[in-house]
Amino acid sequence: MILDLPKEFEFGFGPLVELSYLETVFGISRRTAALYLKALRIKPVYIGKQVLFSLSTLKRLLFVLNRPGGPGFIFPGSKMKNNPRVIKNPEYLTEVTDRILEQAADPSILAEMAGAAGRDSGILKQFIPKNPVGRPPQKKGKE
């Protein structure tokens, strides 16, 4: 049996994967996979007959949507869209908002993702400002 795995391309900023990645991972149709990208506001890249998207962007958005205090997300075609309990909950999103995109674009989200995954975030500390706005400079201990 030969597996037909989605192609992955690396250009130095994170992998670009074929749309079939979503089809395989979530067990959905190609049309539904395209609707997922549209709802997440991820613009695909078209090269010949291939439809590619940034896996890093997908991971960042899903992290922001699902981290503690995140709004949650209802994907297109989900049966939960018809659940009255979910419909009445205004926190659940059906499309990514500008605010979510801004949070996902913040470089400090990489450190938060690494921390949540239990990885050493030392290399990512360079992306976090030393003295974020509103926080006074930290004083060094007595020597």
Image (tube, rainbow, N blue to C red):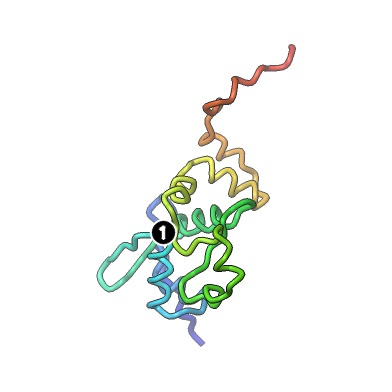
Q: Which residue is painted at 54% across and 56% down in the image? A: 65
Residue lying at the far top in this picture: please name it: 143
Query: x and y percent of residue 57 in the render?
Result: 45, 55
Query: x and y percent of residue 55 in the render?
Result: 45, 60
**Amino acid type, residue under disc 1 in the picture:** Ser
Query: x and y percent of residue 117 in the render?
Result: 64, 53
Quarter of the image for the C terminus: give it. Answer: top right
Q: Which residue is painted at 27% across and 66% down in the image? A: 47
Q: Which residue is painted at 54% across and 28% down in the image? A: 132
Q: Quadrant of residue 135?
A: top right
Query: x and y percent of residue 140 in the render?
Result: 68, 17
Instruction: Name the residue tied to disc 1.
Output: 54
Q: Which residue is painted at 58% across and 68% down in the image? A: 86
Residue lying at the far right in this picture: please name it: 142
Q: Is residue 36 left or right of residue 109?
A: left
Answer above or below: position of 132 versus 38.
above
Helix, strand, or loop for circle 1?
Answer: strand
Q: Is residue 112 left or right of residue 57?
A: right
